[in-house]
């Protein structure tokens, strides 16, 4: 079955450590997105990518990094520079080809809940 | 920049109607609406494109006024299953999908 998979579902990190969240899709989608969800703040865009080897900062990119070496994979690294990393992280993908305005739906993974201990 | 949604929350009885509004300060190419149940991923409801096209999903419909950079989601004859948090997502000329803070809808029997 086609879909978008995030792993792990729960992640605990010690302060000062970097951690990488996985996002894989087998939908042959061009565009992929990372969002952070905090209570009352909705979905805030961290990074997005429309094509392999290219990505752009979203609204809250500080303290995060991404890579897009393969079409199906878009891992997110939460670095020690992120001051308040405890949150629910959602990855999404859509079929939109590069440079288009995305008139197709986005599919979301089930999310990773990151807790800093 | 995130679009602005209103209201933040609404409580309905089964069968009642509600409207959720979404506005942006930027010119929009399209508006997306999603619903998220607690602890789950957001689920797509509909897309509205430039040209004022109106789409529907069961008894949930929406409109898009591109001149005013606004969209509204209409919940008609609400059902218990309509409970959740509704998000509008907007696409402008930077091609990024930005979401609002969400509107929590609670439908009671």
Image: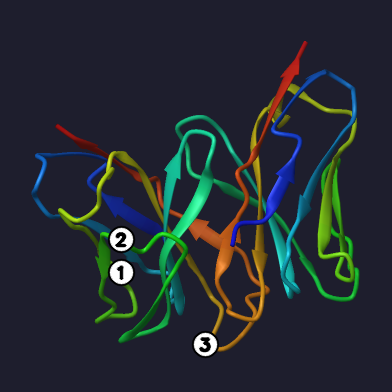
Q: Of all residues shown, which one is farthest toward the top?
A: B109
How far separated are the C-alphas under marks 1 and 3?
A: 16 Å
- Residue underneath mark 2: A23
Q: Secondary structure at mark 2?
A: strand
Instruction: Name the one closer to the observer, B28 or A103.
Output: B28
Q: Position of residue B59 (x, y in %)?
A: 86, 40
Q: Position of residue A36 (x, y in %)?
A: 41, 50
Q: Is residue B7 above or below residue A101?
A: above
Number of other residues with Cα within 10 Å of mark 2, as a class: few under 14, some 14 to 19, many 20 or more: many
Q: Is residue A56 left or right of residue A85?
A: right
Q: Identify which residue is drawn at 73% across, 61% down.
A: B24
Instruction: Pick whichever of labels 2 and 1 is earlier in the sequence.
Output: 2
Q: Is residue B97 left or right of residue A59?
A: right
Instruction: Pick whichever of labels 1 and 3 is earlier in the sequence.
Output: 1
Number of other residues with Cα within 10 Å of mark 1, as a class: few under 14, some 14 to 19, many 20 or more: many
On the same chain: label 3 and label 2? yes
User: Does the CB distance between marks 2 and 1 fall below 8 Å?
Assistant: yes
Q: Identify which residue is drawn at 72% across, 45% down.
A: B5
The chain letter under disc 3 is A
- Residue underneath mark 1: A74
Asked if residue B56 can be seen in this view, the reply is: no
Q: Position of residue B100 (x, y in %)?
A: 63, 50
Q: Which mark is residue A98?
A: 3
Q: Is residue B17 above or below residue A30?
A: above
Instruction: Name the one closer to the observer, A112 or A44.
Output: A44
Q: Secondary structure at mark 3?
A: loop
Q: Identify which residue is drawn at 24% across, 52% down.
A: A82
On the same chain: label 2 and label 1? yes
Instruction: Pick whichever of labels 3 and 2 is earlier in the sequence.
Output: 2
């Amino acid at each position: 079955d086609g879909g978008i998979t995030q792993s792990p579902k729960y992640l605990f990190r010690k302060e000062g450590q970097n951690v990488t969240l996985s996002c894989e899709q087998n939908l042959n989608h061009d565009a992929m997105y990372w969002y952070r969800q905090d209570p009352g703040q909705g979905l805030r865009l961290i990074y997005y990518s429309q094509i392999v080897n290219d990505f752009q900062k979203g609204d809250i990119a500080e303290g995060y990094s991404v890579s897009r070496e393969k079409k199906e994979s878009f891992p997110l690294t939460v670095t020690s520079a992120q001051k308040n990393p405890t949150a629910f992280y959602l990855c999404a993908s859509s079929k939109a080809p590069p440079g288009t305005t995305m008139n197709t739906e986005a599919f979301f993974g089930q999310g990773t809940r990151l807790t800093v201990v | 920049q995130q679009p602005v949604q209103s209201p933040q929350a609404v409580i309905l009885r089964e069968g009642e109607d509600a409207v959720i509004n979404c506005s942006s300060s930027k010119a929009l190419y399209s508006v997306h609406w999603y619903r998220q149940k607690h602890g789950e991923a957001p689920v797509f409801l509909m897309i509205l494109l430039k040209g004022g096209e109106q789409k529907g999903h069961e008894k949930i419909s929406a409109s898009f006024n591109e001149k005013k950079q606004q969209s509204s989601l209409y919940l008609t004859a609400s059902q218990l299953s309509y409970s959740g948090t509704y998000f509008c997502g907007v696409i402008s000329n930077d091609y990024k999908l930005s979401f609002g803070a969400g509107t929590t809808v609670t439908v009671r029997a």
